[in-house]
Image (cartoon, helix red, strand yellow):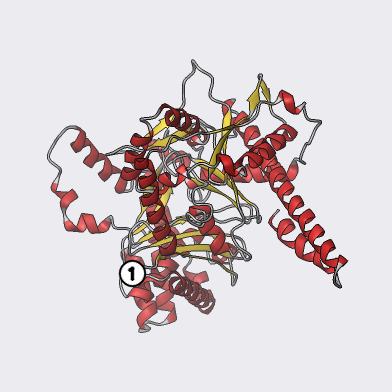
Amino acid sequence: MDRAITQNPFGLWGLTGGEGCSVIKAVLILQHLLNQMIYIKHLFAAHLISGVLDYKTLLDARALPVDYARGQLAGHPMCMEQYYRLFTSYRLPGPQRDTLVAQESSVMPEPEHIIVACKNQFFVLDVVINFRRLNERDLLTQLERIVKMANSEDECLPPIGLLTTDGRTEWAESRAVLMRESTNRDSLDMIERCMCLVCLDDASGPEISDSTRAMLMLHGGGPSKNGGNRWYDKPMQFIIGADGCCGVVCEHSPFEGIVLVQCTEHLLKYMIGSPSKLVRAASVSELPAPRRLRWKCTPEIHKLLSASTDKLQRLVKNLDMNVYKFYKYGKEFIKKQKMSPDAYIQVALQLAYYRCHGRPVSTYESASTRRFREGRVDNIRSATPQALAFVVAMTDGKLSSSEKMELLQGAIAAQTKYTILAITGMAIDNHLLGLRETAHELKLETPQIFTDEAYILSNQFILSTSQVPTTVEMFCCYGPVVPNGYGACYNPQSDHIIFCISSFYDSPQTCSANFSKAVEQALVDMRDLCDICKPTCNTSEQRPGMIHSKSKIFLCQLDKSFRNLTRTEEELKKN
């Protein structure tokens, strides 16, 4: 869709020439193309909504195939509960703590509507009317109605969605002010109970790079563009730009990244494999008009909106996002070295950071614990002593290539071992969190470990990383979690790796472009080291395998239930 929209207008400009009447022709052709682009955008949106409804039908029937673990300890069935929160949950802001609200009532049927955001306005689109699910032609008709309503300047309302971009405490306070008016309560209720949002964005600029796409998904380009065309408490927001810039924004609380990826890939396959079905529409008069959500805005609300607008603009200017593709090799090369691609990339990130800053830092990598019922994630702490030994050796140049290779193998083995511990519930972070929260709930004095400087520093994740692999060409991105940190999301493909590196401009310690270059150089140097030491790899490849085997024995002795998780040495080395 992206290519179709961005290429067509420029290809047809060659049909015009000369002056006078040709100028009129050019204007008419341009207007026709613009109309065609708008129609394609709405048609795409209708097809997407149809795919969402198809997917939700699977979820409602609990007919979604069970996921099985891939990578380390592959083949184990995974808990599927996160999927059932995709379209039925909401993050409710609170003054002290937010609440994850899940709609699980068996008494009342779930609301069957979505919210369409257009021109910073919000509209209710019922997808089931008189017990009939709308077909794509009906959806297209309703979307065109919504766009026409949004373009009506007489009814333009303040961009209330900007309030959701603020800090959680500030948004909770603003929501409390909104709730004083019954009109606002009704509008909030419709948003909070909807299946998802579809955001029809205006075009954002003439040239769109992957880095720009990433930022437009996250913040919409700020208050002057599509920043108010969002509602950040909803788990799923599908963004469809007039210029072909499309994506999904997720609120991460109800589910992890792979659930979002699986849903998105299902929708893409549906849209590619299922042609748009524009059956004969029912009479327009039979379709009730979509409803615009109304807001009663007092001077206090306008003041809050102004404050939220200023903060968002500062955040937009401060975000330093760099999306790039490393094309020199991908995960297939790494697998040929008998190494885990994920562990390999994690070690490369450690090397890149050390070269940029001369020290290791606390690092977070998400590890799925969906092998357990209701499992979410734990933390793989990638800044291991073995990784430090390797990056120091690669930096000071005192050791031979074979010695460096031995250290690389040790770093990857340590990373792999920690990964296995994390995904089988034996990492440290969730257990420590449980102890801290138990003490809090029992009104006990906070244990000293949680106020110790070392513990506090260990939880300042300057490197916040995540592998989000996909089977189609797409990427995931997010911002850093501390002011002087990096967000590093990566998607290893067969012959290339996609990286999304983020930081903040106002930190003198970080620069996304420089860190990206350091990551690339680290990957090149590690490849060269593997090539130089290829004979050594063949003679010593059993060494990491012995570490994996010990891990397997340890897990099996700890609990017989883990016996079915063990695999052969070669399987443990796969990603």
Q: Amino acid at mark 1?
A: Leu
Front in this rendered view, residue 147 or 151? 151
> Where residue 96 sits in the image (x, y, percent)?
27, 39
Most extreme residue toward the top is 107
Toward which corner of the image does residue 171 lie, by quadrant? top left
Residue at the disc numbered 1 = 388
- Identified at 41% across, 52% down, the residue is 309
> Where residue 68 sits in the image (x, y, percent)?
54, 41
Front in this rendered view, residue 423 or 84? 84
- Identified at 70% across, 26% down, the residue is 287
Using residue 24 as the reference point, say whether residue 392 is left or right of it. Answer: left
For the question of whether residue 116 can be seen, the reply is yes
Number of numbered discs overlaid on the protein picture: 1
For the question of whether residue 468 can be seen, the reply is no
- Identified at 76% across, 51% down, the residue is 36
Q: Above or below — where is 137 with respect to 356?
A: above
Q: Above or below — where is 286 with respect to 35?
A: above
Q: Secondary structure at mark 1?
A: helix
Is disc 1 surrounded by few (<14), some (14 to 19) or many (20+) residues within 10 Å?
A: many
> Where residue 534 sits in the image (x, y, percent)?
53, 75
Front in this rendered view, residue 280 or 348? 280
> Where residue 14 sits in the image (x, y, percent)?
83, 69
Most extreme residue toward the bottom is 398
